[in-house]
Image (cartoon, rainbow, N blue to C red):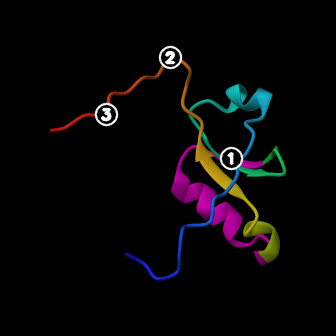
Amino acid sequence: MDDKGPARRVAPVPRPADLVRFAGLWVALLDGEVVAAEPTSHTLALRLHDMDHHKRSQLVVEYVRPTGDSYIVGVG
């Protein structure tokens, strides 16, 4: 066990209501607004590379799963 104590809890980021229009894309969110969207995480990373470091450190990056898309997590 780590001697640093319990892990710091981070509050969840609210999901913007209009995020559904970015279905199937990787997006970068800053203060609840989409600042970049690309079809792959690699192209998104390249696009964000030149962004100001302080601004980039505040981004939340996520894949917007299409609403009809489903998956199963299990053993095997």
Dot placed on the residue nearer the N-terminal end, 2 or 3 = 2
Q: Residue furthest top?
A: 68
The residue located at (57%, 43%) in the rendering is 39
- The residue positioned 62% from the left and 66% from the top of the image is 8
Type of residue at label 2?
Gly
Q: CA distance from mark 2 to mark 3?
A: 17 Å
Return the disc, 2 or 1, that comes first in the chain's sequence: 1
Q: Marks 1 and 3, Cα distance to the nearest angstrom?
A: 22 Å
> Tag 1's secondary structure?
loop
Magenta run includes residue 39: yes
Q: Which residue is mark 1?
A: 12
Residue shown at the point (32%, 28%) measured from the top left:
72
- Classify 10 Å Cα crowding around label 2: few (below 14), some (14-19), many (20 and above): few
Percent position of residue 36, x then y: 74, 50
- Label 1: few (<14), some (14–19) or many (≥20) C-alpha neighbours in 10 Å: few
* Residue in the picture at 76% in, 64% down: 58
Q: Is the N terminus in the top left, top right, bottom left or bottom right quadrant?
A: bottom left
Q: How far from the left and from the top, in percent, is residue 20?
A: 69, 26
Q: CA distance from mark 2 to mark 1?
A: 24 Å
Quadrant of image for the C terminus: top left
The image shows residue 47, relative to residue 30, as above or below, that is below
Q: Position of residue 33 (x, y in %)?
A: 83, 44
Q: Is residue 58 magenta?
A: no
Front label number (2 vs 3)? 3
Q: Amino acid at mark 1?
A: Pro
Image disc number at residue 73:
3
Label drawn at residue 68: 2
Q: Position of residue 17 (x, y in %)?
A: 78, 27
> Which region of the structure is painted magenta?
35-53
* Classed neighbour count for the residue bearing mark 3: other residues with Cα under 10 Å, few (<14), some (14–19), many (≥20): few
